[in-house]
Image: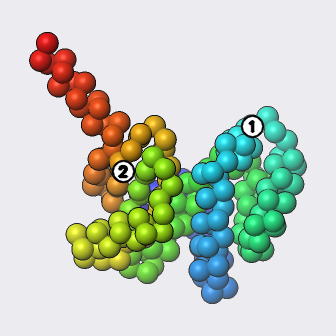
Amino acid sequence: MSSVISGVAGRYASALFELAEESKAQDQVSGDLDTLAAMIDESEDLRRLIRSPVIPREDQARALQALLEKAEVGAMTRNFVGVVTSNRRLFALSDMIAAFRAMLAGQRGETTAEVTSAKPLSDAQTQAIKDALKRVLGTDVAIDATVDPGLLGGLVVKVGSRMVDSSLNTKLQQLRLAMKGVG
């Protein structure tokens, strides 16, 4: 597998992947993790809760469990997040989700593309990116989308070791460098 699936995140994701595979619940867990990843991306408060070493583990666990129940996340994923919380590994939760997605994509014969945009992508935009990448790569592509307002506009697409950066921020940096050379 890829380098994403190493270290702490890889071990936890592998354990969850094996449990989901045994229970034939990969699609359910994948959907739950997509929901959780979206919640993390959309909420600075949730990111702070996950990253903070000073918030007691019990408080983190209670808050996350309440949030996951309200989002109707399945028991296997809730239990997984509970174990991650009790073992003080919440800081790696996003990496665990990415590693699980990569394992599932590998099992399905898909390639995973990391797509970073300035604003959340619509379903139509995501599908257009999938279609374009499928034409180029010749294989199904799973999209791991993240939002980075610092890009200002455009996209950064990573597939394996290849990266295409068409972000407005990068273009402005290149223009600044070119202008320094002129004067």
Q: Position of residue 24 (x, y in %)?
A: 63, 87
- Which image quarter is the C terminus in? top left
Q: Nearer the viewer, residue 8 or 112?
A: 112
Residue at (22%, 69%) from the top-left corner?
136
The reply, left or right, for residue 5 in relation to residue 169 is right
| Badge 1 amino acid | Pro
Look at the numbered disc 2 and give the secondary structure of its residue.
strand
Q: Nearer the viewer, residue 101 or 149?
A: 149
Task: Please state the total of marks drawn on the protein image.
Answer: 2
Residue at (34%, 55%) from the top-left corner?
158
Q: Position of residue 79 (x, y in %)?
A: 77, 67
- Mark sitting on residue 53: 1
Scheme of colours in the image: rainbow
Question: Which of the marked residues, 1 or 2, is nearer the chain's N terminus?
Answer: 1
Q: Residues within 10 Å of mark 2 (few under 14, many from 20)?
A: many
Q: Residues within 10 Å of mark 1 (few under 14, many from 20)?
A: few
In this rendering, the label closer to the viewer, 1 or 2: 2
Q: Position of residue 141 (x, y in %)?
A: 37, 72
Q: Nearer the viewer, residue 67 or 65?
A: 67
The reply, left or right, for residue 164 in relation to residue 29 is left
Residue ranking furthest to the bottom: 24
Q: Position of residue 74 (x, y in %)?
A: 74, 74
Residue tagged by mark 2? 155
Look at the numbered disc 1 and give the secondary structure of its residue.
loop
Q: Is residue 22 above or below residue 123?
A: below
| Badge 2 amino acid | Leu
Residue ranking furthest to the left: 182
Q: Is residue 94 visible?
A: yes
